[in-house]
Image (cartoon, rainbow, N blue to C red):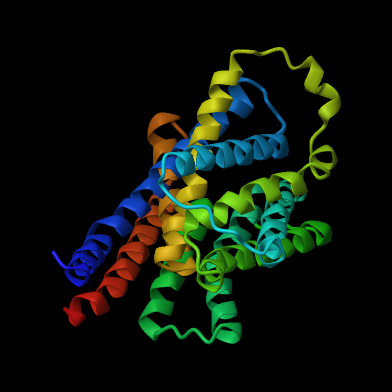
Amino acid sequence: MSHDASGVVESEFATKFRVPFYLALNACSSIGIVFSNKVVFQVYNFKYGTLLTFIHFIFTFVGLEICRQCGMFELKRIDLKKILPLCVSFCGFVALTNLSLVYNSVGFYQLMKVLTTPIIVVIQTLFYNETFPTNIKLSLALTCVGVAIATVTDSEANLIGTLVAISALLVTCMYQIWVGTKQKELECNSYQLLYWQAPISAVILVPIIPLLDDLSTLSEWPNSDAVTAIIISSLLAFLVNISIFLVIGKTSPVTYNVLGHFKLTIILTLGFVVFNAHVDYRNIAGVLVTLSGVFWYTHIKTQPAASKK
């Protein structure tokens, strides 16, 4: 087979199988880590969320080094100054998200989280010359409305909490956009970029950990059984981090965000079924509306590809 023919086969394979696989990998690992972290935090009483994030990034770097040694990707030298904004935005995303949960109710936190998708659309339209047709905007609006219905239990807010939540929202949006643009700008793949981003972000997190976590009680934490749960959580974090870069690199931040709303819907559903969480008609309606928006968006995004064949 010629090189060109091989490239065509590779391209067709990537279009048909790789992207759905990346989406499924991200969905499964993300849902898994929510429940594994719940076990770590609640069952084993490990209350050090930022420290756990640091551990996750160390595992991610080690996992990538193993992948590199196995020949899964080649090391590419990258100007670290060019990825520093990505690393800083990630740390800001983690820190501000945690602070948002400290200062705000869960309902208000979820409401602000829902706004990520439309804000990304606005940012990409204003600063990255991206255009979004009306049906895309409508499907995103439907998705956001569904998540809001399903998750928002109250909208109580305070000035400090609101400022922190808005800051977290903007930093999160920029992080997700930069994940995609940096791969194109630096002409590297997701593995090559994350290989450098993970350890740098871990180093940046070091001074943040004692600010957000009460490490004075860490020595009193006696539960060695939780180590296994933390390792499982960290392995899932490795898969989540890899799949975020793969999904955004091959699709778009908006697609990734809609996938996030879909994952949230699944998590809510599993919460109803597995943990016997309280459910009312508003929850069910929100799940159904969210799924409608997700499938509508997916249908719209697959139409151009189909028409080109």
Q: Quadrant of residue 267?
A: top left
**Which residue reaches farthest front?**
2
Viewport quadrant of the N terminus: bottom left
Q: Position of residue 54 (x, y in %)?
A: 68, 39
52 and 8: which one is in front? Answer: 8
Q: Position of residue 206 (x, y in %)?
A: 79, 41
Decide: is 180 above or below 272: below
Q: Position of residue 55 (x, y in %)?
A: 65, 34
Give the residue displayed 54% in from the left and 71% down from the top: 181
Number of numbered discs visible in the structure rendering: 0
Q: Is residue 283 visible?
A: no
Q: Quadrant of residue 78?
A: bottom right
Q: Quadrant of residue 307?
A: bottom left
Give the residue displayed 56% in from the left and 69% down from the top: 186
**Which residue reaches farthest left?**
1
Q: Position of residue 77 (x, y in %)?
A: 60, 59
98 and 106: which one is in front? Answer: 98
Viewport quadrant of the C terminus: bottom left
Decide: is 180 above or below 64: below
Q: Is residue 94 visible?
A: yes
Give the residue displayed 39% in from the left and 85% down from the top: 133
Decide: is 174 above or below 198: below
222 and 141: which one is in front? Answer: 222
Relative horizontal placement of residue 106, taking residue 157 as reference (left or right): left
